[in-house]
Image: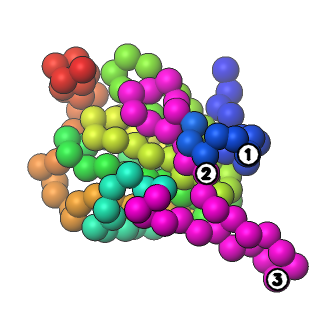
Amino acid sequence: MSPGSARDWGADPASLPLPVGGARLVRLHAVEEARGLLTVGEAARQVPFEPRRYFVVSEVPDENIRGEHAHLALHQFLVCLAGRVTAEVDDGRRRAAIVLDTPRVGLYMPPLTWGAQHHYSRDAVLLVLASHEYDAADYVRDYPRFLELAGATR
């Protein structure tokens, strides 16, 4: 089964749960006019946490995979500002994949969600909002350890 496209996702509802514990797509407000597209995200309304850090991923060769980890406490919100990238989420029991290909839709990833991003287009620009500053101790990079943690908390 190939991943669905965020661009093709219908106008309703404002938030679309994925079959992975707590992860969901969030429609962002967009105004399209002759002067271009303006997409607005309001942290208090659409991002379910207060962003404390952001980072941007770009210029990724198509064959590379980014992510491949989970966080113990950190929440993330991913928005593809340009191009496209396939994002996978996994809660230890179920997985889902979505092609992020529009700035109109964000992907919310709660703590203890394994995430991976791959198949970046050459022009892809991925914005990631994070709930905390960087903390190496918050990362779970070993998938079997993630499965243990996910099973112990869910």
Q: The residue under label 3 is which amino acid type? A: Arg
Query: What SS does tag 1 mark?
Result: loop
Which quarter of the figure is the N terminus placed in? top right
Q: What is the C-alpha distance between the residues marked 3 and 2?
A: 21 Å
Quarter of the rendering containing residue 36? bottom right
Q: What is the C-alpha distance between the residues marked 2 and 1?
A: 8 Å
Left or right of 152? Residue 97 is right
Query: What SS does tag 2 mark?
Result: strand
Q: What is the C-alpha distance between the residues marked 3 and 1?
A: 22 Å
Which x, y percent locates residue 53? Answer: 31, 68
Between 84 and 77, the one lying in front of the other is: 77
Q: Which of marks 3 and 1 is nearer the N terminus?
A: 1
Left or right of 8? Residue 139 is left
Q: Is residue 105 above or below residue 147?
A: below
Numbered circle sitting on residue 27: 2
Disc 3 or disc 1, which is closer to the eye? 1
Q: The residue under label 2 is which amino acid type? A: Arg
Queried whether the magenta region covers residue 21, the answer comes back as: yes
Q: In this view, does 13 lie above or below 130?
A: above
Queried whether the magenta region covers residue 152, the answer comes back as: no
How many discs appear?
3
Please give the range of residues in magenta: 17-45
State the residue position of label 3. Answer: 35
Which residue is depicted at the point 83% across and 75% down?
A: 33
Query: What SS does tag 3 mark?
Result: loop
Quarter of the rendering containing residue 112? top left
Numbered circle sitting on residue 114: none
State the residue position of label 1. Answer: 11
Q: Which residue extends farthest right?
A: 34
Which quarter of the figure is the C terminus placed in? top left
